[in-house]
Image (tube, helix red, strand yellow):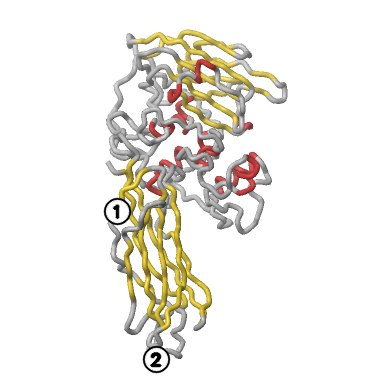
Amino acid sequence: MRKTRGTLLVLLLVGLSAVFTFAQGAATVETSIDIIVSPDVLAIKLDGSQPIAISGLTLEVDGELYSLNLYPGFQGLNFDNISLPICFVLRVQFSSTPLTIECAELGNRIFTVTLPAADVFWFDPTLNALLPINVLDNSTLLQNCSAGARCTFTFSAPAAVTPTPLPTISLDCVISDTLNMFSTVDTDGDGYSDFEELCILQTSPDEPNFDTDDDGVLDEIEEWMRSINPNWAEVNIANEDRDQDWLFDTVELDNGTDPNEIDTDGDLVSDFLEFYWLGTNPTENDLRDENGDGFPDVMSRYFPPSAAPDACRLLVTLTIDELYVVDPEEANGFDIIPGDEPEMTYGLDIEGEIVDNRYRQQWSASGVMGGDRLRNFPQIPARAMSCGQTAVVYVRLIESDAPFGGVATLGEANTPIPLIFHRVPIAWVGQAGSEIIFAGIVEDGAYDYRLRYTLIVEPQL
């Protein structure tokens, strides 16, 4: 069953083994908690300097319980070992309400989850009023916060629990000693990594996702877009997502992003991730990189200190999987030699740099015929690139018309692939089976060639 994006993760904590319970005589740490609310933002700030365990910290409104550690956007944090100070923010999509000064000053210690308006539990739009909030540690009442803008109290929190070593590949939003944000673990084999499904799409990594109308946007994303604006996912035009960033052109035009650019503001995080996942402004370059590692801080937070890279360096590999000859340009009996003699030049370039690694593959003698599937292309060595650069898949296809000596150019493609965070892990910017089609008509007749390739991007550790 798909987990609907934004559905409130409400869970009665009775019997929940994952939450921390106070052990008799366990060490505690005093910390100050501020809860600041407005109709579309709820912020929880914890002050202090010593790591604490807050797995049992829960909010109760109208009898329903809301645990911070159950929101996918916060699951990159170990709630048994939280470093202070920290600010958790639940923000309504498109909210323009600024953070409180206290939270804003924390920089990369602010963690945000964006919700549809329907999932706001601390404000009643019918009454136009904020609601009282009870703060619990498991089932123990810590504080009753009356309906209002701010509630401040002191919490005797358990001292941090020594973390249990994580498995090599973690199937949640926690990065272990290997950078599983770059891992291509895909349990259900649907082309979306478990990290993406659990942490961004909020779908089940055990059940395949679908694109029923084959428009390049997942059903789950379309449903969420419709839940915000019914018109956004109903437009049926040929180029409704021309930059293929999973945001319909109507969404982009309505929100000021460029429908021709995956990353309008150039901060290395795609418009889709900012809009759908982070709730940040995709038209304003506001994602910081305070430690200078080349990763926006919102991505760096998934790296533990023991595995954090010192720069966003990448190895990019292009593999030509197959050239499928649907219909060669001639091969129709008029040639002395039955078959056409195509020649393909291909390479992996870096946009703005001098081309230095082009490869060529030729087919001669009896040529190629319709239905042929050409494989075993020479492999291009992996190229070192950096986040923010653009990889370019270059392909040029020509055809010699032996024995008459004519040459027809069947097409040239320069496919740019910006090395930014759009698919997460970034290693999935190019998927197996990406296709370039060379089709048209030349003097001797029609032709149709389908080139399939794989682009793999991985961290250079």
Local SS, label 2: loop
> Residue sitting at 30 percent across and 25 percent down?
163
Task: Relative to 143, say whether 207 is above or below.
Answer: below
Residue 167 in percent (x, y) is at 29, 36
Task: Relative to 19, say whether 215 is above or below.
Answer: below
Q: How many C-alpha atoms fall within 10 Å of the one at disc 2: few (<14), some, or many (≥20)?
A: few
Q: For residue 314, which quarter of the picture? A: top left
> Residue sitting at 44 percent across and 19 percent down?
86
> Residue sitting at 54 percent across and 54 percent down?
216
Marks 2 and 1 in Cβ contact (< 8 Å):
no
Dot 1 amino acid type: Ala
The residue indicated by pointer 2 is 336
Q: Is residue 177 left or right of residue 372?
A: left
Residue 108 in percent (x, y) is at 43, 25
Dot 2 amino acid type: Ile
Local SS, label 1: loop
Is the C terminus in the top left, top right, bottom left or bottom right quadrant? Answer: top left
Q: Nearer the viewer, residue 20 or 441?
A: 441
The residue indicated by pointer 1 is 382
Task: Relative to 436, say whether 270 is above or below.
Answer: above
